[in-house]
Image: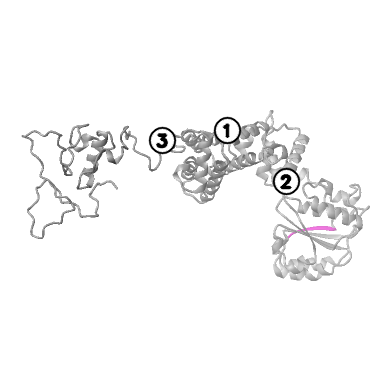
Amino acid sequence: MSSLALYRRYRPESFAEVIGQEHVTDPLQQALRNNRVNHAYLFSGPRGCGKTTSARILARCLNCEQGPTPTPCGECQSCRDLARNGPGSIDVIEIDAASHGGVDDARELREKAFFGPASSRYKIYIIDEAHMVTSAGFNALLKVVEEPPEHLKFIFATTEPEKVIGTIRSRTHHYPFRLVPPGTLRDYLGEVCGKENIPVEEGVLPLVVRAGQGSVRDSMSVMDQLLAGAREEGVTYAMATSLLGYTDGSLLDSVVEAFATGDGAAAFEVVDRVIEGGNDPRRFVADLLERLRDLVILAAVPDATETGLIDAPADVLERMQAQAGAFGPAELSRAADLVNEGLTEMRGATSPRLQLELICARVLLPAAYGDERSVMARLDRLERGVNFSGGNAAGGNFSGGVGAPAMGYVPGPDAHAPAAAAPIPPGGGAAAARAAVRGGGGGAGPVGAAGAGGTAGQPVQQGQPVQQGQPVPAAQPTPSAPSAPPVQPPTQEPPVASAPAAPPTAPAPAAPGTPAPGAWP
């Protein structure tokens, strides 16, 4: 087995082998067929998407003995020199602009460029990382790039085309490369694993594609690392998740089910397992957001698995479909928004575990927020019939709530009797209200008869004033029982002269229009 890196062993040798860049390779092949090749090209795009490889293939097509041709023969001396493991050609010069981007290097290149090729049709300069060339270096190359001799070709490759000065860009044909789609990259990795004769479990390739983020070279490097550590059974899913640092699917299933059922204990237990297992809380939140994104798509597009919107193994897709059905649309969208906001807040956080627990608490407690999303989430839970009573940490007590009566309040059958059943004695205030309630309902109202100091169920003598804070006398008072001094009605004007001092137990009458303390509205 060769020790050469996987992305070097399987580097394409023709435009037909380049994957995911048909918008670039097809026009280049047609230009070769039409013999309309420009003197300078600019290849731009993310790292690892095939810019330098395509530049080498273009040089191979131009210098082939049967060329210029879109398909190199692979048998002539130039094709063998520029092959995957070839020694290289003296007429194809690769320059790393990161270390040769000064004005002196540009002058040296300009002096050598006018000499003809040694044995090939064209002398080709491939300038990699072209954005590292200084402005003085580009200005030194400007004349030779603008009007090169017939035998000279330039190919600039860069990840930041905006840093190439405009005078150079205007004299080149610009081809932007893109990231490779996940489906195309997954199929390509499967072919490579088949050539390596190493079995790979079904869920491993999506993880590798996700780690590579659309870059073929990065994905091949990750796959090479997994293949290097594979045992007799091949590359397993558990090995891939532990090595790449992704969250295990069982943890994601547990926390999503806890969100759906409102089980706060289960959600915080998953958080504890994440921390105790040595996993990165930020990675866990990112994976959770990815799972919620898949659930949102499944809830909106039932046939997302057939259309390829979601890339996951069959068993994982089955579980996600059941999880998507356990959420309401508003509740699921709110959970995804909160997790996304929490992931942004976790950048630079001093306590990632605390941030993760707060994210779970926000998702589990829609009753604690009064915004529209939380209200819609609570409606979704009510429509699904999920019981959150009993002080559950998931959603609070839905049977009570703000403004509900106290748990000990049980209204009697005559609590709301008509006001005519018991005339209110003059004087008003809380005592008169209590007397009216006792006279009509027999003390079964919100305030019991015993709370006023009397016997429950005993009516108050009609027309007898009752003072606040004094016991209510019975209907037939005994001679030995001292009677309370009468209270002057509020309608009478107070005397101008100094009034005699009121008894210590009698409060001052309330002013007209001012409610007495404790009075009912």
- Give how far apart the Cα atoms at labels 1 and 3 are: 28 Å
Q: Main secondary structure of the magenta part?
A: strand
**Residue type pointed to by label 2:** Pro
The residue to which callout 2 is attached is: 181
Please tell me whether residue 274 is drawn above or below residue 21 in the rendered image: above
> Dot 1, crowdedness within 10 Å: few (<14), some or many (≥20)?
few
Element carrying mark 3: loop
The residue to which callout 1 is attached is: 250
- Whether residue 187 sits left or right of residue 35 in the image: it is left
Give the percent coordinates (x, y) of residue 477: 11, 34
Element carrying mark 1: helix
Q: Earlier in the sequence, mark 2 or mark 3?
A: 2
**Front-most of residues 235 and 286:** 286
- Whether residue 486 sits left or right of residue 207 in the image: it is left
Give the percent coordinates (x, y) of residue 141: 77, 68
Rendered residue at 53%/36% (across/down)? 383
Q: Is residue 51 visible?
A: yes
The residue to which callout 3 is attached is: 391
Q: Which residues are magenta?
A: 91-96
